[in-house]
Image (cartoon, rainbow, N blue to C red):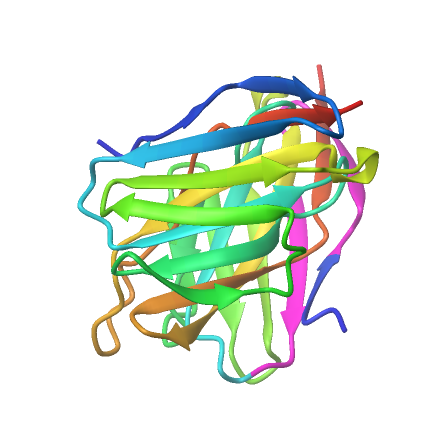
Amino acid sequence: DTEVTQTPKHLVMGMTNKKSLKCEQHMGHRAMYWYKQKAKKPPELMFVYSYEKLSINESVPSRFSPECPNSSLLNLHLHALQPEDSALYLCASSRQVVGGQTNTEAFFGQGTRLTVV
Amino acid sequence: QQQVKQSPQSLIVQKGGISIINCAYENTAFDYFPWYQQFPGKGPALLIAIRPDVSEKKEGRFTISFNKSAKQFSLHIMDSQPGDSATYFCAARAYSGAGSYQLTFGKGTKLSVIP
């Protein structure tokens, strides 16, 4: 099973709303990621969680708030977003890196298509 | 600063032909090079990956060629099919500490395979 499940698939929210994106994996991966992808662009890293702790925040505005409740779940809380935040939000997970191992490919979910109106 | 340069931006190939996508990098800290395939509205799916100590890896119709000294790698799709029409991203991995790593993506190549 190499599945990363994201919900919802589509989300439309107003600029004053609060919403959350959810991500779940059952591969035993201890590294989880949030990416943002605009149309015709590559994914851009937002956050990295390793062993349920935030290890990287790529200077993401505070209106995006990540949370990792346990090793299988990753949430992204959204508040007071702007129309330019409309994008495909991707969750990914990978096996934790130990030494020089290379079988730590990242597996992506199908994404949440977010539209901010 | 773009750390992984990918070309071409778009590619049109006839069914049965060979599709070739090239990538180049500068950062010697990269230690693993995956390729992702993405269909419209879907997340990227891992296609094939290679370590820098291997010069070639083949999986079915997909082959990665890797030139460590030139810091270049490429994806070859043999016998291209219309179902291969998608956007392809090369990526390079670097360890980011605390048991995780970061992927740096190329800008992507939109492949269209015409019947």
Residue B33 versus residue A18: which sits nearer the camera? A18
Residue A15 in sight in this render: yes
On the picture, is B79 further left or further right than B58?
right
Q: Is A7 within the magenta?
A: no
Q: Quadrant of residue B86?
A: top right
Instruction: Tell me the magenta residue range.
Output: B7-27
* Residue B18 in sight from this viewpoint: no
Image location of residue B21, percent across then percent down: 66, 51
Viewer-side residue, A72 vs B68: A72
Tell me if residue B20 is in the magenta stretch: yes
Percent x, y of residue B100: 35, 66
Q: Spot the residue most to the top.
A: B115
Q: Looking at the image, which is closer to me, A100 or A88? A: A88
Q: In this view, does A41 lie above or below A95?
A: above
Quarter occupied by the C terminus of chain B? top right
Note whether A68 is above or below B24 in the view shown: above
Image quadrant containing the N terminus of chain B:
bottom right
x 63%, y 38%: residue: A79
Q: Which residue is drawn at 41% across and 74% down?
A: B95
Residue A97 x %, y %: 27, 68
Residue A90 is situated, as x and y percent measured from the top left of the image, at 53, 38
Number of numbered discs: 0
Give the overall secondary structure of the magenta segment.
strand
The residue located at (59%, 58%) in the rendering is: B74
Q: Would residue B26 be found to the left or right of residue B98 on screen? A: right
Residue at the image position 40 percent from the left and 47 percent from the top:
A67
Q: Residue furthest left?
A: A28
